[in-house]
Image (tube, helix red, strand yellow):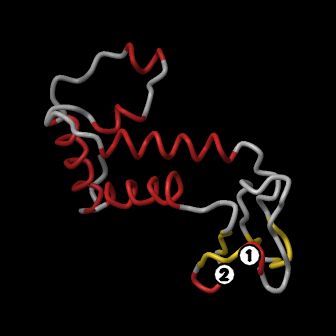
């Protein structure tokens, strides 16, 4: 389920990941590595141990996130979203509305009373296109 993957992602990168010790690599199917011993080099930064470390897939000697100064704000946002999505809720409550904020223009738009006509017209159009008819 996509929702479970989102919550797991937010938990991993907002709470569990040990940024001072661990980096991320997308090579060889993806894996984590110890910053202190990355391919024989020390990618840890004693002055800024919290920095995110991500290996460049095209150049394993390059840390593409070595200047990720605001990573702690990102980590806090992921942790907040994780807390909001795992907190108890009412059946009628929108879970995504807890973590996504609409701008004033979208928030002021009138909500549709029913989505059935929208889906009906879309599926009818799709069936004509798949049958090779011109609409």
Asked if residue 114 is positioned above or below residue 41 in the image, the reply reads: above
Image-based side of 124 in relation to 7, left or right: left
Q: Could you tell me residue 116's position as x and y percent?
A: 14, 36
Q: Quadrant of the N terminus?
A: bottom left
Q: What residue would you read off at disc 1?
A: 57
Residue labelled with disc 2: 27
Mark 1, secondary structure of its residue: loop
Q: Quadrant of residue 17?
A: bottom right
Is 102 on the left or on the right of 77, as rendered? left
Q: Distance between the residues labelled 1 and 2?
A: 6 Å
Q: Residue 97 carries which label?
A: none
42 relative position to 21: left or right: right
Q: Residues within 10 Å of mark 2 (few under 14, many from 20)?
A: few
Compared with 3, 135 (above or below) is above
**Residue drawn at (17%, 42%), measured in percent from left and top?**
120
Q: Is mark 2 on a helix, strand or loop?
A: helix
Work out whether mark 1 precedes mark 2 in sequence or the reverse, and give the earlier one: 2
Which residue is depicted at the point 65% across and 70% down? 24
- Residue 27: image x %, image y %? 66, 81
Q: Would residue 50 be found to the left or right of residue 116 on screen?
A: right
Q: Is residue 56 above or below residue 4?
A: below
Please report the residue visible at 43 percent of the width from the left and 33 percent of the height from the top: 100
Measured as percent of width and height from the top left, residue 112 is found at 23, 24
Q: Nearer the viewer, residue 126 or 103?
A: 103
Front-lying residue, 74 or 115:
74
Q: Quadrant of residue 19?
A: bottom right
Assess whether mark 2 and mark 1 are in contact (beta carbons under 8 angstroms): yes
Q: Quadrant of residue 7?
A: bottom left
Label 1 crowd bin: few (<14), some (14–19), many (20+), radius 10 Å = some
Depth check: give the residue in front, 108 or 46. 46
């Amino acid at each position: 389920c996509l929702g479970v993957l989102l919550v797991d992602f937010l938990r991993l990168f907002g709470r569990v990941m040990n940024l001072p010790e661990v980096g991320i690599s997308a090579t060889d199917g993806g894996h984590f590595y110890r910053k202190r011993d990355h391919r024989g080099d020390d990618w840890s930064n004693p002055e800024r141990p919290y920095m995110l470390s991500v290996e460049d897939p095209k150049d394993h000697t390059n840390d593409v996130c070595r200047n990720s100064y605001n990573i702690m704000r990102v980590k806090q946002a992921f942790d907040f979203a994780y807390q909001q999505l795992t907190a108890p809720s009412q059946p009628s409550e929108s879970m995504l509305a807890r973590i996504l904020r609409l701008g004033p223009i979208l928030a002021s738009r009138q909500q549709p009373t029913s989505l059935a006509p929208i889906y009906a017209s879309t599926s009818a159009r799709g069936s004509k296109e798949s049958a090779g008819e011109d609409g």
